[in-house]
Structures are given as C-alpha cells and as structure tokens.
Image: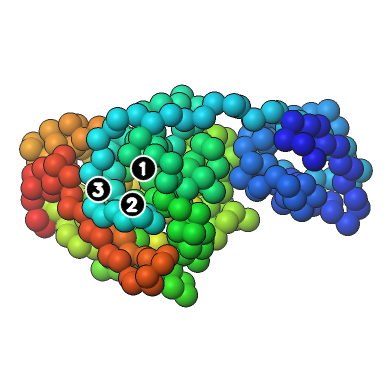
Amino acid sequence: MSLASTETLTVAPEDAGTRLDRLLAAQLAELSRTRLKALILEGAVTANGRAIEDPGYKVKAGEMLIVNVPPPEPAEPEGEAIPLTILYEDDQLIVIDKPAGLVVHPAAGHQTGTLVNALIAHCGDSLSGIGGVLRPGIVHRLDKDTSGVMVAAKTDRAHKSLSAQFADHGRTGDLERGYLAFVWGAPDRPRGTIDAPIDRHPHARDKMAVRQGGREAITHWQVKERYAGADGKPVASLIECRLETGRTHQIRVHLAHLGHPILGDATYGTGYRTKAALLPPGARQALAALARQALHAYFLAFQHPVSGDVLQFQSELPGPLARLRDSLAPA
C-alpha cells in the first residue's frame, strides 16, 4: 500500500461491533494506530459514504469503509538556534530541562520553534532518524505548557532502547517518571492510585477523557503539601505523581477525574477558576502570572542504552512555579 492511497474495506459479519480504529489497525497493518486515529479525526474515513470522526465508532456488518490516506507533507524540520538547558549529554543521548511554552515536535500550527528544531541544530547529523522525519530522536513528550526533564536519542540504538523502556513504563525495568502538580482542593487521603481508561473526548477533539473502552491509564499520586486559603480552609495541594502508563494529558485528566484539577489548567480545570478568589493575594498574582497548568516533570530515571547504568535526573521547580509555591500558605 502506498502512503498516498484510498483503501476500501467491507465489514465482515464477525467484525460487527468492533471499534473503527481497532478494525482498521487489524486490516491496514502498514499504518500505525496513531496515524489511523489521526485520519479518523480528520474526517478521512467514511462508512457508507458518511464521514466517521469517532475512533470508537462501532462498525456494522456490510458497511463499506473507505480510508483516504493523503500523501505525506514533504516539510522537513530545520535546525534553529534555540537555547537548551542540558542536564546530560553523550554520544548516545541528550537530557534537557524543557521550559514551559516549548512545543516538542512540529505539528499543525507549530512548524518551527520546537524542541526538534533545537535538537537538530545542536546535535546535527548524529540525531536519530528512527522517530520519523518530524520527530527525530523523540521517544516521549511533554505538553507545550508542561516543564521538566526530557531525554532524546542521538542514535538508532539509543532510540530503540529508550522507546522500549518508555513502552514498558517501568513495569519490568528502571524507567521512572515523577511529576509535581499544584491542584485545587485537598484529597481526603495521603496517597492513592487512579486506574481509569483514557480516550479521546466524545465531543471535543482537543481533549481527552476518562472513558470505558479507552486505553489503560494508571497514575500513582501522593500529597506532598497542603495549602490554606484566605479563610484558613484547605484550598490547594502539591501532589507528586508517578506514571505507570503514558497517555496523552494523563495526569491532567486523571487529577481532574479525582476532583482535583491542576491550577491554571485551561482545558480540564475551567470549572475551578472562581476558586482563585480563595487564594492568598500573592498566590492569586502568581497563578495569574503563570498562565499555564502548574505541572512540572521533576524526575526521570532510565537505563543507559549502551552502558546499562541507571541514570537519574531531577529538575527544580522553575521560577514561576517556585513563586507560586512560596506564595501559598501551609494548611
């Protein structure tokens, strides 16, 4: 199958009731699940002539599915002299402390000024290409407005090893990812685990949601600090999260599902904006100045792809988050 093509499938009786994305993944093995999901969301898949934009759509026996696969965009990112805070680097990999506001890889609306552009300029020809033209060296990502530790591969060997570790999520290996999140409210217990599947939001394309039938998602959390509001009652908390899976927006979705969305999260915490009035004046100012979700990837550990040594990296809270923390009153 060429990359620019039209594929036609007829749903067999035994496949009736199967999710659209899963059926296509089984039938069109040359396209990744991520690529197929993107095509569905873009309206490039029809069932009996009707565009289906829900990856979870349950197909019906006899339906004719048409998948229009457009040709790939030829754009190839170029190196840009974007400053990087490098925590570690050798001939296999590079570890950076990503600032908030930096997009990881080129995408719609962000063709330049990304981490990939910076890595291409810094690493040159050594950057691994196994991640694809638009994502060379990238083995995991952080949201644009999430700061913290990231690792990128500089060789194919490192890319394969690191990708396998992130796919395993530390269940059998040494990979660990730690995040700090300032959330609204105070959980009624000191720690817990959120085991709730995540999938695309049924009505908002740019959002994820806890949904039955979604992909497994597990987040372990622990309260580190609790903060009092102007009335003396608990208004916010600092929570440490450890990931056992790596879904899009996982921590943001899971903490909102728990009833404690992240401060400043304009996507998953909109219903809590009025709670800012309960913060001490300094904290209100710090949160307004932050203008992003108060989430920081503070810890990353993994096994070096060549030496086998376990490397650990930690990032302090960046200035705006540190100021938010200092302005909050302990409960």
User: Which of marks 3 and 2 precedes in the sequence?
Assistant: 3
In the rendering, which numbered label is found on residue 14?
none
Residue 199 percent coordinates (x, y) = 56, 48
Q: Are marks 1 and 2 in contact (CB under 8 Å)?
A: yes
Q: Can residue 10 be seen in the rendering of this structure?
A: yes
User: Which of marks 1 and 3 precedes in the sequence?
Assistant: 3
Using a 10 Å C-alpha cutoff, classify the residue at mark 3 as few (fewer than 14 neighbours), some (14 to 19) or many (20 or more): some
Residue 189 percent coordinates (x, y) = 28, 68
> Pointer 1: what residue?
123
Distance from disc 2 to disc 3, alpha carbons, whole Å, reads 7 Å
Using a 10 Å C-alpha cutoff, classify the residue at mark 1 as few (fewer than 14 neighbours), some (14 to 19) or many (20 or more): some
Using a 10 Å C-alpha cutoff, classify the residue at mark 2 as few (fewer than 14 neighbours), some (14 to 19) or many (20 or more): some
Q: Quadrant of residue 201?
A: top right
> Pointer 3: what residue?
86
Amino acid type of disc 1? Cys
Residue at image point 41% right, 50% down: 154
Q: Can residue 175 be seen in the rendering of this structure?
A: no
Label 3: which secondary element: strand
